[in-house]
């Protein structure tokens, strides 16, 4: 099976490598020629452009930074893809954009699914991503052999755009828990309580979470090496708000969390791990 | 060892029973004579009032609804307790009240620790509570043989009031996660995505939490039998805000969560489980 | 002077009429043929399309619902406008869109200013709008003779996009004051205080505002005939959040107000006056 | 008529002086002997304590910092006041405390009204305060001759506690408008728009308010000399939240504004004017 892979960044590059390892023929493209060259070194084929990567592919995978890039690339995939092409967009973008892409693809016989991921660079390298897939059941099944080389949890969550909606829901919950844990730390410290001991108790009870398990020690020590950057989480909170707006719903905590993440960015922490939301709550309270 | 136990409600009653089972002599008191009678049936001794329960006790445990009850009972414990009495208040109250109780107790040689719990009625019955203890190290050690009959996790988190501060931090995180999960559900449903499938993905990744593990199925089905009631969580959010005010800190998400919990109560859901915060977010969005 | 006027809705129609009354030659276009016909009855000239309205115009005015319509119409204005055309967009849209329009216009010698208004249908009919103008000083001066027929306050607030930014700031303040007054009413009523008497005091002191002056009586009586509709204010809060995002700033109250306005819309009050934000706060608190 | 006046601080001192000027016999008390001495210099009588100030008074006025001081002084007023005493508490405190004071006073035949003020030190000196009065109609009428010497707007807003509720509503609106104007300024500046020009437009339209009229120039110049201090507004937001809790209502914006004011205090701006809320929004956005 021939796979065209577009977007060979921090996430896309190891994902394409995993597909190569699994025996797929992968033709890759990225705006950075250096990245294309590295894929070729691993046994892939370098493409000269999107159209070149799409030509002859049975499956096209895109892993792009944001909605505008998808809006630019997707029409080319749809136009130059062969009949019955399976198009798997794994970027995290607005659900509306995914629905729009699927609509236009269907009009010319291309089968599009949206399949955003969570699990970060680590998950991309190890092939242990969680993948949330939206699309027609038969198209999702068709994509499964590819997706299973990239992640360990592949869940079909609904029609086109549903993968993105679930990703948006994931990110609003993650951002919110970081905010809550940050407020807990600030309250504990200001009250003269050892935050490490306090968070240990929280982690063991109903307040427990993956974030407390993985990040409470680094947060208390103010270690914010990424991980997943504030800049990306800021982008994702924008997607969550756009998804809420498109769905016609009011999400008050999400609205608040989005502004806190925006503050982290405004304060210059865009390149830190998203747990650096603590720095915003801390500064709100520093003399 | 003689234990005076004051407050035999939903939590206090099974806790006192566990102390009896462990071989302690327990003299209990409650404003409800019926509850006192039930303790006597289990082998305890019924007291006619607080002073009667305190007289002769080596350890006094109180498990009361809120700060005002502790402010009423604690002075009697301190005044009528025997020299060197160990006073363990397990109520969830304002950290400031606990610090004040400890100060007044110390002045007359009574050793006070604050030891609020999490784990609910189930934990009280099974003796599996998590207990956050504030006080002098030697007093906390002295209390440990009693506390170990009531809970499985006993953590000394700091000086007097620290137990309450950690409990407050716990409750603000729990309330906040309920709010975030509620917003995720509303977003998924309004976008035409099956919330059960969506939350399954969230539960398996960085958005995962004890609350998603335990409550996502009942929340999606709108089953809100308590559990821990909204009324109590409303009380606890008031404690969290008071603790923040006393510590001089600003907690923006906590401030917001407190108002959402207040709305749940205003809407008449005070007797439902705290996961019923979903009803507030849902109603915010219902035509 | 020949004016091309595009967008003859509730606002645009009386504005175009005022320009006719002032002696300008106005060629109008709207997607509704009926509206074009009505302009012709007033002495204007009906155009068959955007290009037709633009051809021969010295000044083009657009008054369109939102950014997408401007993104569709503006390129035609720029392409088919005569050399040195003055293009005045009076729609309320994202500042970024206005900056983009100005950039593309400048590239071909068209002078674009953004001039959103406040004052509503009443102000449009009476020619008493407040107009916030962004653009180069000489272009704003060139537009002034036209704008002075439409409004009584015309303020040049900065370069391209600045008009829109000021409008966004205006709308976030207006939405926020409605929310605050709503919370005041709900608190007063729930406390057994006559809200009319209470708001009278507020209106006379530091809490006083145009909104309290104009709307407190109708709000207390729950009269919500528009005025300015929730649907439009919802659009405008989206613009305010987009402007904040583009400027890289965190606006926590604005984030919250946007969700309350979104709730008003989700609850089906989109066609009511924006003072109907009270219905959201009220419902949050109704059993 | 003999007036006992307790609390001779920044507000109370000029108020007592105005009553002296109006010809009332005023016996004053304060914890500061120096302040009592100054009242005596103006022709008043210095009292040695609360009981001394109350003895023989026809009317007692208290102007104290917060609920705890009123809870300490009011019982003495009620116990030592002569039969049918009129007790006018002008402090800004929790509505619940005022209701409790009125209840206890009524039990022994003392007539209590709550009469908090707005207008600040300037209004106290000039006798131009706005006074919100809660109590029985005949008691409010009895107090009017005294109140008319202190303020120009005296409004009877409801039963005992109603004055405090209206004051709380006033303060939540004032705090909120400061927050909104601060966000407007930050958005304008970050977008390259002159904030003075922008706020001029807002002040002239539906976004207009007393705060924009009085404070926009100083806010833009970052001049924050008090005026009304952040510390006091922080106290008042606590009262507003307590009033909401007592009334059983959820006020989401108020909850948020309270945390922003708390941040201003945590950042060390407690002694600045409440318009210094701008510093919080600014810092949230500073690199």
Image (spheres, coloured by chain):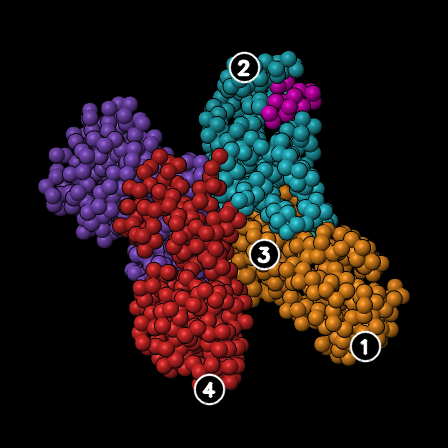
Chain colours: A orange, B cyan, C red, D purple
Residue A5: within the magenta? no
Question: In the image, which disc is placed on residue C83?
Answer: 4
Secondary element at image label 1: strand
Secondary element at image label 4: loop
Of circles 3 and 2, which is in front?
Answer: 3
Of circles 3 and 1, which is in front?
Answer: 3
Where residue D3 appears, x then y in whole percent?
A: 17, 36
Instruction: Using the numbered discs, state the Cα–Cα distance from disc 1 to disc 4 in whole angstroms.
Output: 47 Å
Magenta residues, as a range?
B10-26
Instruction: Using the numbered discs, state the Cα–Cα distance from disc 3 to disc 2 in whole angstroms.
Output: 58 Å
Contact flag, marks 3 and 2 (Cβ < 8 Å): no
Is there any visible trace of residue D57 in the rendered image? yes
Instruction: Using the numbered discs, state the Cα–Cα distance from disc 2 to disc 1 in whole angstroms.
Output: 83 Å
Q: Nearer the viewer, residue C281 or D21?
A: C281
Relative placement, left or right, of B192 versus A129 is left
Where residue B229 appears, x then y in whole percent?
A: 57, 33
Picture quarter containing residue A68? bottom right
Residue wearing tag 3: A246
Chain identity of mark 4: C
Q: Are marks 4 and 2 on the same chain?
A: no
Instruction: Using the numbered discs, state the Cα–Cα distance from disc 3 to disc 1 in whole angstroms.
Output: 38 Å
- The structure residue drawn at horizontal position 60% and vertical position 27%, both measured from the top left corner, is B11
Residue wearing tag 2: B33
Going from the N terminus, do you reach mark 3 or mark 1 first? 1
């Amino acid at each position: 099976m021939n796979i065209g892979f577009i977007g060979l960044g921090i996430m896309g590059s190891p994902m394409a490598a995993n597909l190569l390892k699994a025996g797929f023929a992968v033709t890759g493209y990225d705006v950075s020629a250096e990245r294309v060259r590295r894929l070729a070194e691993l046994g892939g084929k370098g493409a000269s452009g999107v159209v070149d990567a799409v030509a002859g592919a049975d499956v096209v995978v895109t892993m792009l930074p944001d909605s505008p890039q998808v809006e630019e690339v997707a029409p080319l995939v749809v136009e130059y893809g062969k009949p019955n092409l399976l198009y798997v967009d794994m970027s995290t973008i607005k659900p509306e954009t995914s629905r729009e892409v699927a609509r236009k693809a269907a009009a010319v016989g291309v089968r599009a699914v949206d399949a955003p991921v969570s699990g970060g660079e680590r998950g991309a390298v190890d092939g242990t991503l969680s993948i949330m897939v939206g699309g027609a059941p038969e198209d999702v099944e068709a994509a499964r052999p590819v997706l299973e080389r990239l992640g360990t949890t592949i869940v079909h969550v609904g029609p086109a755009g549903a993968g993105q909606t679930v990703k948006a829901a994931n990110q609003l919950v993650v951002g919110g828990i970081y905010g809550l844990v940050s407020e807990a730390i600030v309250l504990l410290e200001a009250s003269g309580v050892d935050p490490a001991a306090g968070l240990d108790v929280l982690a063991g009870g109903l307040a427990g979470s993956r974030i407390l398990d993985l990040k409470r020690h680094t947060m208390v020590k103010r270690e914010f090496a990424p991980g997943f950057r504030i800049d990306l989480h800021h982008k994702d909170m924008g997607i969550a708000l756009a998804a809420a707006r498109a769905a016609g719903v009011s999400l008050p905590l999400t609205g608040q969390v989005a502004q806190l993440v925006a503050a982290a960015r405004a304060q210059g922490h865009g390149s830190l791990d998203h747990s650096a939301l603590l720095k915003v709550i801390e500064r709100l309270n520093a003399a």
